Structure formats: structure tokens, C-alpha cells
Amino acid sequence: MTAPVPPAPPPAPTPLTWLYVPGDRPAMMAKAVAGGADVVIVDLEDAVAPERRAYARDATAEFLSCAHGTPVHVRIADQADLPYVTGLPGLSGLRLPKIAHAAAVHAVAARAPGTDLYALLESALAVEHAYAIASAHPSVRGIALGEADLRADLGVREDAGLDWSRGRAVIAARAAGLAPPAQSVFPDVRDLAGLAASCRHGRALGMLGRAAIHPAQLPVIEEAYRPTVQEVASAREIVEAAARDAGAQALVDGRFVDAAIVAAARRTLTLAHRA
């Protein structure tokens, strides 16, 4: 008799909060992994002054010498950082800045085999190549915009000027079978109301979650991106109706339900019940 096949483990919940911490501040790294973020990103790029880069590499390598309860990614400055961090037990993924071509992804994947990669699109050329980058290699787990650099490249002053690029990233990620991109950082750590409004706008564009630069931003992002009680109730009603009848149908309140709407409802319930 054939032994029963054990059920597949549930998929890991999609991160909603990604907390950046400078690579030259080991004390801050330790606090960050206990701070409640879904993912901590140790930054070897923008957050580290050039004269402290060697120290940051060593401090980051020491921090990654053991695994932590929270996934830890490293945003490298360039490929010269790879020998210091790849293969370490505490590394869960690499954030790749200024990726503009699929070939750049392949170059990193060859030097960091088996490591999850997240490409940052920070130029007009990168946005133009968004799908090619998102689908460049099986190790790519996500894409996101680096909005400060992209804003400078485009000469955009108003936030709405980036909406087309945000939509392009959302579509490219979906077409490549990736999770929706997380929003870029909100730089004013004191303006939590502005952060919440910006998150609602990003959510309306199809983005999911956000990078943060201060722990105070984390609960605001979490609340903005978690489904509301009403959304969960509506999704549950749709899924239950689909279980009764697999075909297209109308609910008692007149809403039409088909396979696409059911799939969206299931994604809502999965997000609502994330750990």
C-alpha cells in the first residue's frame, strides 16, 4: 500500500513591512530583528558613508553569522559586497539596487546561487525593462521601485508623477508570477498620517506592503495593508458562495461573482490570516 503523501506546507505569508537598518550599526540590527518587521534589510548602500563601507561589510557579516528569528536581507551597494554576505546562515535574501537589465540579475544569481533576489528599479530604463527583470531568473522573488533615484532620473517633483511607474511595476510583477511590489520608503518619519494616506494610495494602485526607515512606521503600514473587517466578510461570503456553486452567479445583494472575483477573495482571506 502506498504511503499517503503529506500535505504541502502552507506558503509563507507575504511580507507587509520591510525595515531598513544601516549596515554599520550592529546594535541597531539587533534591535531591528526584534522590532516586529516582517523582514529586516541591512543596508550597505545609501545608509553607509563610503569611509565606513569596509566596517559595514564586516559588521554585517558578523551579524549574519547566525540565523535570526526574522528574515534578514542585505541591500548591497554593488557586486563587490557579495563575497562578504553570500552563504551566511543569517542571510535570507539580497536587495539589488539600480538594476536596469536582466543581465545584471543573472550576474548576481551566478555569484549567489540559491539566494532569493529582489531587484530595485531606480531609473527610467529599469521601469521600461520591468518585466524582463522580474522574469530574468528563478531566484528573483520580487521587484520594487527605488523612488528617490527614479524621481531624480525622471525629474518628477509631484508624487503623482510616479504613479505610471508604480503601475508598471505592479503589472510586471503579476505577469512574472511574483507578489505585488512593496512601496518605497516614506522619508518623513514624523508624518504618520501622511504615511497612512500614502499607503492607501499605494494599495489602490495594487502594491502590497512597504519599506520603512523607522520602527514607528511599521504598525501604520501593517494597518493600511491588512484587509478591513468588511473586506474579510465580503471575501468570505464570495468564497462560501463559490463552494456551493462553481459557476458564475450573483449574490443576494446583486454582486456578480466569477472565477476571477473568487480568486481575489481568496487572496484577501490569505492576507487577513497571515501570521
Image (spheres, helix red, strand yellow):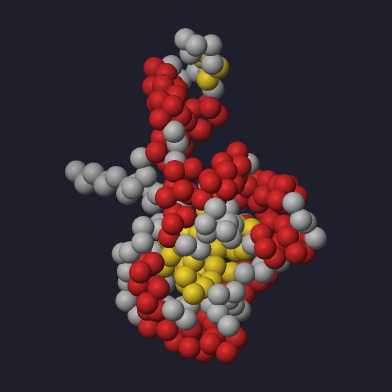
**Number of marks:** 0
Residue 259 in the image: x percent, y percent?
53, 26
Residue at 29 percent across and 45 percent down: it is 7
Give the quadrant of the N terminus.
top left
Q: Which residue, as the protein is rendered here, is positioned at the far right?
A: 155
For residue 207, side relative to residue 216 (left or right): right
Q: Is residue 125 left or right of residue 266?
A: right
In the rendering, at what x and y percent does residue 248 appear? 53, 17
Question: Relative to residue 13, is residue 123 drawn left or right?
Answer: right
Q: Is residue 116 visible?
A: no
Say which residue appears at 58% left-offset and 60% top-offset: 187
Q: Between residue 275 and residue 217, name the one nearer to us.
A: 217
Residue in the image at 41% along x and 21% along y:
237
Q: Is residue 56 above or below residue 153?
A: below
Would residue 275 appear left or right of 268 to someone viewing this image? Answer: left
Which residue is at a point 21% across and 46% down the rendered structure image? 3
| Residue furthest to the front | 190
Task: Please state the horizontal and vertical placement of residue 262, each as a whole percent of the image.
Answer: 49, 27
Give the vertical position of 149 relative to 83 (above or below).
above
Toward which corner of the image does residue 98 lie, by quadrant?
bottom right
Viewer-closest of 22 and 239: 22
Residue 29 visible? The answer is yes
Percent across and percent down for residue 136 are 63, 61
**From this viewpoint, which residue is outermost toward the left?**
1
Find residue 65 and report its image quarter.
Answer: bottom left
